[in-house]
Structure formats: structure tokens, C-alpha cells
Amino acid sequence: MIRVENLTKYYGEHLAVDSISFNVKKGEIVGLLGPNGAGKTTTMRILTGFMMPTSGDAWVAECNMATNSLEGRRHIGYLPEAIPLYTDVTVRSYLDFAGRLRGLDPYRIKDRIDDVVEICHLEDYIDVLIGKLSRGFRQRVGVAQAIIHEPEVMILDEPTLGIDPIQVTQTRRLIKELGQEHTILISSHILPEVSMVCDRVVIIHEGQIVAEDRIENLSTILKGSQSIRLEVRGPTSAVTRRLQRVQGISQVRYEKPYHIVECPVDQDPRSNLMTAIVQSGWTLLSMGTVDMSLEDIFLQLTGEEDFDDDEELEE
Ligand SMILES: Nc1ncnc2c1ncn2[C@@H]1O[C@H](COP(=O)(O)OP(=O)(O)OP(=O)(O)O)[C@@H](O)[C@H]1O
Ligand SMILES: [Mg+2]
């Protein structure tokens, strides 16, 4: 439904998107994940026909967005990074305007406004001036205007940026609901967001794709290691030293009250670990594997050290 091939965009000398390729199949929700300046908005602007690529192609619903963007846009609901909302009109008149702009028949518009207001849970705000709405509700108006013409594909650029945690939860729920009927590409620099909402993730960094997979597979595409977490009753540093000597273990660290043991993904040293602990006369209280969080994966793939997902609360 969305197809990007060797897409490249220079702003003057600056290479913002560097020959990226990916697909989004019908019915999928895919996250375009990357830190600030990665090229997410640029990619989305090209996909929605608002900007020409320097080279490469972007197709949406079989329309090439460089040569056939008018037809392509009929299939796309786009929530841009900065929503162009008029603040001195009511939600109803804004949606009416958005419907006309998209070429809906005037007699259809009233029904569609009722539909999108229900989908976006805006019933209580339909006659309120947009300027009086909180940011989260404006975001919902942004989503409502994006789907008024019943597009098959939705392209949402950081839909939860700058809204509070409660509204973030509601917006995520809304996106999941929309995902039942639409093909969705959603950008984010917030890891929990994509892991909660998306089926698959494309990770982009400095204009290049650094990983692409289903969320649950991401940790295995890293060449990296797996972690095992042990809770041992015994003298901490002696336990650390003993575990380090177990065959196949690459690293041991202590994070109170656990010993975290790293080993290659193709090995299972659990029985060796257990034997070592028991033979030393200590007690093994618990043992389990530690799944790599999407955040760990992201840091490892992009080498970003200063990443901070608390930005979710930032405006
Ligand atoms: N209009 C422009 N003119 C020149 N450079 C631009 C322009 N828009 C974006 N850039 C640059 O292109 C790169 C990619 O920007 P883009 O907005 O696509 O990133 P992004 O992933 O959406 O980032 P963010 O998370 O901050 O929204 C950045 O280095 C940015 O500074
Ligand atoms: Mg952006």
C-alpha cells in the first residue's frame, strides 16, 4: 500500500534522506522510528506529495507521489507534524471546511462529520472553538480532518508529541482503532509508542534505515548477546567471580539484587550457572532471561547515547 524505493532527499548540500526503501502492506501499522533530525518528516512529506524527492520513488495506493500526487492524496489521510488548525472556528465548521477542501460532496459532509467526531471521540466538543481546546483534543481534530474523506492510508507524523500521558494513552487507543480499517505509517522518536501501537518498525537514523523488522524480532537481528538474570543468596563479589568462570559467559554485572549474565544468543548456559551456584554452596532464588527493550535496541543500532524517552512529557 505504501512503497518507498531508494528515496533520497537533499536540502541544498544537506543529505536528509539517504536512499531508503521500505514497504507497508495493506492493513499494517508500521512505525517510522528515529531521533530528531533522522528524516522522518521529510520522508512523510514526500509520501504525501508535499515535497519532491531528489531521487527515488514513493508510491501510495499504486500512485507515484511525484507524478500523480493529486490522485494519490485522495487515498491518504495526513496528520502533519504541525497541524494547520484555525483557532477561531468551531470543530464542526473546521471539519466542514476540511471536507470541502478534499472535494467531498456537500450532502456527504454532514454524515462524515458525524462519523469522524464519533471515531475521534469529539462529541462533546463539536461546537467548541478550536482555540479553546487542549492540545490533545486539537490533535484529535487533526486526526478527524485527516480521515474525513475516508482514506485507505494514514500517515501520522508524531501524533502524540507534546500531549499529556492520559491523552497519549487515548491517542494510542484511537490509532489502534483506526488501524483496524486503515493502513498506517506513524512516526515517533518515542520507543514505547511504536512498540505499543505498531506491528512492525522501520528504524531510521541520519537519513538511513538501520533496522526493519517486527517488534518481537528486533532483538534477534542484532548480532548481540542475551542476558540472564539471577538472584543468588551468597557473597556478592564471590558470586560475580564464580559466574564469570562459567563456560560461555561473556560478562557479569551486579544490579542489586540481581546478577546479570551476558552470553551469545546461540548458547544456553543456564544449567551450568545453576550447577556452579549450587556447588559453591549458595542458593539460587530465581533465574530468568531479560528481554532487550526497544530502547536498548535503538541505542545499540544508532549509537545514540543521550536518548531519553522522558521527552514524552515535553512540549
Ligand atoms: N526545509 C528544510 N531545509 C533544510 N534542511 C531541512 C529542512 N527540513 C529538514 N531539514 C533537515 O533535514 C534533516 C531531517 O529532518 P526531518 O525534519 O525530516 O527529521 P525528523 O526525523 O522529522 O526529526 P524530528 O524528530 O525532529 O521531527 C534534519 O537534519 C533537518 O535539519
Ligand atoms: Mg519530524
Image (cartoon, rainbow, N blue to C red):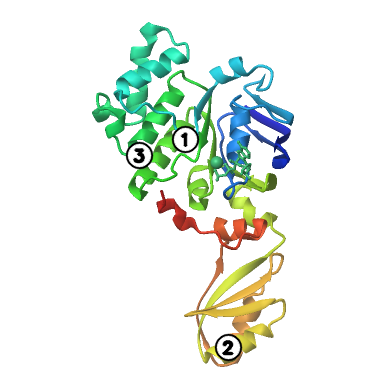
Q: Position of residue 195 (x, y in %)?
A: 52, 49
Q: Whole-Å distance between the Cαs marked 1 and 3?
A: 11 Å
Q: Secondary structure at mark 1?
A: loop
Q: Circle 2 is placed at which residue position?
A: 239
Q: Residues within 10 Å of mark 1 (few under 14, many from 20)?
A: few
Does residue 133 appear left or right of residue 14 in this picture?
left
Residue 7 screen position, x and y as percent: 72, 34
Amino acid marked by disc 3: Arg
Kind of residue at disc 1: Ala
Marks 3 and 1: in contact by CB < 8 Å?
Answer: no
Q: Quadrant of residue 268?
A: bottom right
Q: Considering only order in the chain, which callout, 1 or 2, is on the residue closer to the N terminus?
A: 1
Q: Is residue 114 above or below residue 85?
A: above
Give the quadrant of the N terminus. Answer: top right
Distance from Cα at disc 2 to Cα at disc 1? 54 Å
Mark 2: secondary structure = helix
- Whole-Å distance between the Cαs marked 2 and 3? 52 Å
Q: How many marks?
A: 3
Residue indicated by mark 1: 82
Q: Amino acid at mark 2?
A: Val
In the image, which is nearer the foreground, mark 2 or mark 1? Answer: 1
Report the residue marked by disc 3. Answer: 135
In the image, residue 300 sits, relative to residue 181, either above or below, namely below
State which quadrant residue 3 falls in: top right
Left or right of 147 in this view: 8: right
In the image shown, does 22 or 219 lie closer to the viewer?
Answer: 22
Above/below status of 226 relative to 111: below
Determine the residue positioned at 36% across, 34% down.
138
State the image coordinates of residue 251 (x, y, percent, origin top left).
Answer: 66, 77
Give the left or right position of residue 259, taking residue 313 as reference.
right
Q: In this rendering, is residue 13 above or below 238?
A: above
